[in-house]
Amino acid sequence: MNIFKLPAICLLVATAAFAQQVPPKAPPPAAAPVAPAPPPSQVVAPAAPAPAPIQFTVPASDPVVLTEAPSSSSEVAVSLPVSSSSAAAPEGKTIFDNVRGNAYNPYGTVGAANTVRDLVEKPADIYGNKFFYISPVSSTGYTAVPFGDGSALIGLDRAPVANLAALVLGYANSNFGIALNYSVNKAFTSATKYSARTTGAGDNIGLYFSTGSLYANAGWLTYATSQSEDNDGDTQSVDYSQIEGNVGITGKSGSLDYDGYVNVIRTGGTRTLINGDKYVDPNTFLGLSVNLDLGYNAFQSPNARIILGSNNRIFAKFLDGIKNGDKAYNIWGLVVSPNILGEFALTETWLAFAGASNAINIVAGDESIRNNSKASYLGISHTSGTGAYVGLRYQKANLALEAEVAANVFNNPFDGFNNRNIFAGFGGFVYF
């Protein structure tokens, strides 16, 4: 086969996958309030979701599962010229530094180009961008437009759990940026001598701020249905929620980009009975972590660049005790996640990108404490496998299409016609 026909074939397949997308189902209405069942000795809670945007939870005995992590907003300049047939890049940037979509950099290699979601986490980077982005696979859409003395970002996205729709609003000028990520899933019931409030999974609010190299964000999320009720003065409640905050700094020193931040999270489930007794589920904890993500621009030429990265985290988890069950105990750990990212200009209109990542986990602490008997734990493990991806980006004039190849494309390249996606994160840009 003529290898120069391969990009065209990929584009045809991606177009077919695009045609198969269907709108996401509307989220179910909030459940009607019901009185909770008599409490067990402890609440059995649904699994808490990975906090957004930064995953913190590391089980004491299980390996870390690779997930999306925030990438740095730092630039890496390369000398590839922007021709008349290339997607237009903002002034002072190159073809590699255009804002990218969800298909790009899933493992958060620092020093790579910004994605649309990076603009939310570090909203000062919204300033100066003008684009329209749609990803039918991810069910998301974003646009950045001039607004007053700055730039505005409008996004239609999803909450971290329950597939609930989210509204994203952002603004940035030359001095700072702010953003809001909001989903709502609440119901209120009121009657004579009775009132109740039900909050469904996916109810979420996130606030983001950045200026220069500094950024901060905080968010609150309900990850399972929660309820509080007052029946003629008798009150009881069930709550499954988490609150999280991050403060960080990004920068660049020579060929090295860095993103360092502190993360605090409080998550878990609680049940409070009419008599005031309170129960917690086994995963209720306070977490603290110090994170340092690094990216080294190991190679660059007019047609390619390679970034070597390492995302590193030191953490502590302080788990709540359970009434008539396990006592409070603590876990400490270190996670080192090496990663690589490469980008290669195949032609003036085709750009290939690829990457890989895994993690090494060192976890120590008290595995469980029962009947005043302590059990210590120490574990060292690698993830069960290395994650890898490869993607293609077609760009001509102010238009760009990009897609990350999913694993099942190697098993059945026509699987997308069975309502499953051949490509992950397929989307397209129009730059202005």
Image: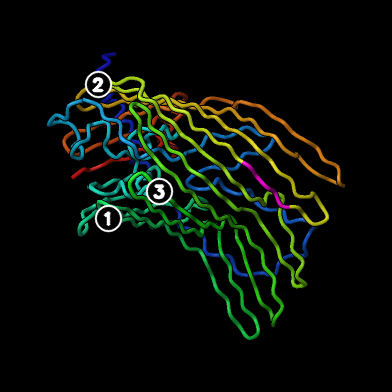
Give the mark toward the camera: 2 or 3.
3
Of pointers 1 and 3, the one earlier in the residue sequence: 1
Q: Which mark is residue 84?
A: none
- Say what secondary structure mark 3 lies in: strand
Out of 138 and 70, give the one closest to the viewer.
70
Residue linked to disc 1: 152
Q: Which residues are magenta?
A: 316-320
Q: Which mark is residue 303?
A: 2
Q: Residue at x 24, y 46 (%)?
A: 129
Image coordinates of residue 248 in percent, x first then y, are 44, 45
Quote the CA–CA distance across marks 1 and 3: 18 Å
Q: Which mark is residue 215?
A: 3
Q: From this view, report whether residue 244 is shown above or below residue 271.
A: above
Of pointers 2 and 3, the one earlier in the residue sequence: 3
View extreme (front): residue: 253
View extreme (top): residue: 1
Q: Amino acid at mark 2?
A: Asn
Q: Residue at x 35, y 38 (%)?
A: 426
In the displayed structure, does residue 186 sit left or right of residue 103? Answer: right
Q: Residues within 10 Å of mark 2 (few under 14, many from 20)?
A: some
In the displayed structure, does residue 325 sit left or right of residue 254? Answer: right
Q: Residues within 10 Å of mark 3 (few under 14, many from 20)?
A: many
Q: Amino acid at mark 1?
A: Ala
Q: From this view, report whether residue 237 is shown above or below residue 12.
A: below
Q: Amino acid at mark 3?
A: Tyr
